[in-house]
Amino acid sequence: MSTVLKTFVAYLKRPALYPELGRKIIKNTVSRRSPFKGKVKTNSWAASIAMSQKEAVSRLFDMDIDHFRNIYADILETANVKEKECPITMGGAGALELIYYACEFTKAQNVLETGVAYGWSSLAILLSLQKRDGTLYSSDMPYLAQDGDHYVGYIVPENLKKGWRLFRFADRESLPKIFKEVSTFDVFHYDSDKSYHGRMWAYHQIYKRLKPGAVFISDDIGDNSAYQDFCTKRNINTSVVEYNGKYIGVFIKQITFG
């Protein structure tokens, strides 16, 4: 059975995912060009201001990332082994230090992420949150084509999962459920729907629920101009991190008056 057919059949078996199925059909037919809207413009802009992860953490949080890999060397090595053992393929690790030190900087209690896969970003967040008995709220679609539901978050150690709430729907269904449980967040990490309109919807929903001083991080901002356009519209002074040939957007939400 082809991957497309297998995925379609899996959707049909899960009525809770029908809204996302409808959106995917539209995205892959009527709106096929929208995921890449403004890509050239944004990559040029991102390249002109990009810095390393180490420099960004130093400038934004006044912290040094070098300790992270030493402190958690054993945990990270175990996670690497588990990823290699996993029978399905998902997204790999990203800028873990940026995510971890964002949580340390804000002394985070409530963190929101979209996109989990193996659970690398989740691991970085939970390593910080465990110090304060905080909670991570994650949104991640089931891996329908690979029968991989139970492998989402595969590398996260069991002892860290007590502070983790994982919602297995598309963002447009997961986020309203999460917002019923908690109203504000200290850190947000976006790594899910990469389309222009998917990003814009989520960015606006989450931005208004971030506390002043909260950290907003979005992966793969070079896919289209959604992140750049969002920051321009809200007059946000953002930093851009170049990591493994891709761009990550990050800013601290400022206090507004009036």
Image (tube, helix red, strand yellow):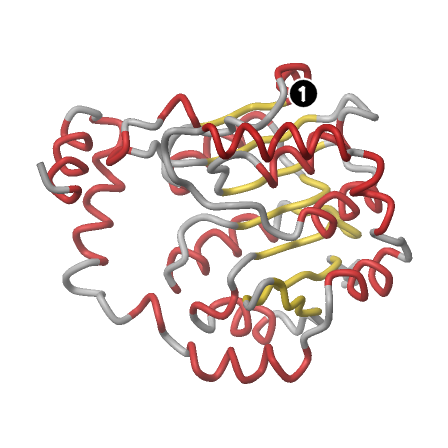
Relative image position of residue 14 (x, y in whole percent): 21, 25
Q: Is 4 left or right of 210, judged from the image as shown?
A: left
Q: Amino acid at mark 1?
A: Leu
How many dots with numbers? 1
Task: Classify mark 1: residues with Cα within 10 Å, few (<14), some (14-19) or many (20+).
Answer: some
- Examine the image and state in which quarter residue 40 appears: bottom left
- Residue closer to the observer: 165 or 62: 62
Quarter of the rendering containing residue 39: bottom left
Residue at x-position 85% and y-position 56%: 61
Where, by quadrant of the figure, is residue 254 drawn? bottom right
Disc 1 element:
helix
Give above or below for 164 relative to 140.
above
* Quadrant of the snapshot with the C terminus: bottom right
Residue at point 52% right, 56% down?
204
Residue drawn at x 23%, y 50% is 24
Residue at 66 percent of width and 69 percent of height: 240
The image position of residue 59, as x and y in percent, is: 85, 65
Closer-to-camera residue (2/102): 2
From this view, report whether residue 85 is shown above or below residue 235: above
Q: Which residue is mark 1?
A: 160
In the image, is residue 131 above or below residue 222? above
